[in-house]
Image: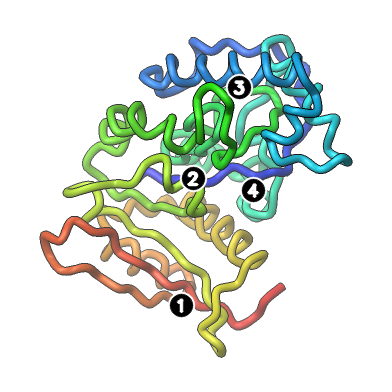
Amino acid sequence: MLVLLPPSEGKAPSGRGAPLKPESLSLPGLAGARQAVLDELVELCAADEDKAREVLGLSEGLRGEIAKNTELRTAGTRPAGEVYTGVLYDALDLASLDTAGKRRAARSLLVFSGLWGAVRVTDRIPSYRCSMGVKLPGLGVLSSHWRAPMATVLPEVAGRGLVLDLRSSAYAAAWRPKGEIAERTASVRVLHAPTRKVVSHFNKATKGRIVRSLMESGAVPSGPAELVEALRDLGYVVEAVAPAAGAGKAWLLDVLVDEIH
């Protein structure tokens, strides 16, 4: 099972570990594309703070994020699973998983990123600011920059098992499973049961809890239908929309929640 996650805007400070070693990151087929984004981002932030703030879409109060980006090559690192600190990651709470759960997370979780493309939660990275929707002057919109290398690398990473896609639309634009892979992919929405409306904050928290439940339980669903059963066994209320056989489309799973908090 491969679980595709968005990053979070909230990030822990860079760690005290060794500086970034690009060659040590997972998915080495993305190395060239990563280097291109890293080089342009560092150069942009070092050369013109005002332009960098405009390009990155940062408010005046986040101006300090630009200085952080200038130090990406020398800043200390920590595992990506510790760098991301948003609502989804708080609910997932990787640090409190038992040893077996942490091993499953290391194998299964892939975090998409405007800067790195995609990394595993064990990959050591510095804190940074660069979303997938950013349009760098030289490379253009990052979701477009990543499409070609992702199309080559991700099918191999997905292997022959289930793909659980929990990414937001901006990050999903960098790689969309196609054909046979799409047919064993499931995307998830979180809906408020009484109103059938999509919830925002609780959407992220519920997705984090779903991933945690799967990592804790050791469930290894082989496809979307088996995932639906596994989630129901774990106590989630799930409605599934299955595409027609051979349509080359992903399943859509609606997880229904009664409370929004």
| Position of the C terminus by quadrant | bottom right
Q: Disc 3 or 2, which lies upstream in sequence? A: 3
Amino acid type of disc 1? Answer: Val
Tag in front: 3 or 1: 3
Mark number displayed over residue 237: 1
Q: Nearer the viewer, residue 2 or 66?
A: 66
Q: Disc 1 or 4, which lies upstream in sequence? A: 4
Amino acid type of disc 3? Answer: Arg
Element class at badge 3: strand
Name the colour scheme.
rainbow
Circle 4 residue = 89
Mark number displayed over residue 124: 3
Quarter where residue 254 is shown:
bottom left
Cα separation between marks 2 and 4: 16 Å
Cα separation between marks 1 and 2: 26 Å
Amino acid type of disc 2? Answer: Tyr
Residue appearing at x 53%, y 84% in the figure: 193
Tag in front: 1 or 2: 2
Residue appearing at x 63%, y 61% in the figure: 205
Q: Position of residue 41 (x, y in %)?
A: 64, 21
Q: Position of residue 49 (x, y in %)?
A: 80, 24
Residue 119 in view here: no
Element class at badge 1: strand
Query: Height in image: 254 above or below 159?
Result: below
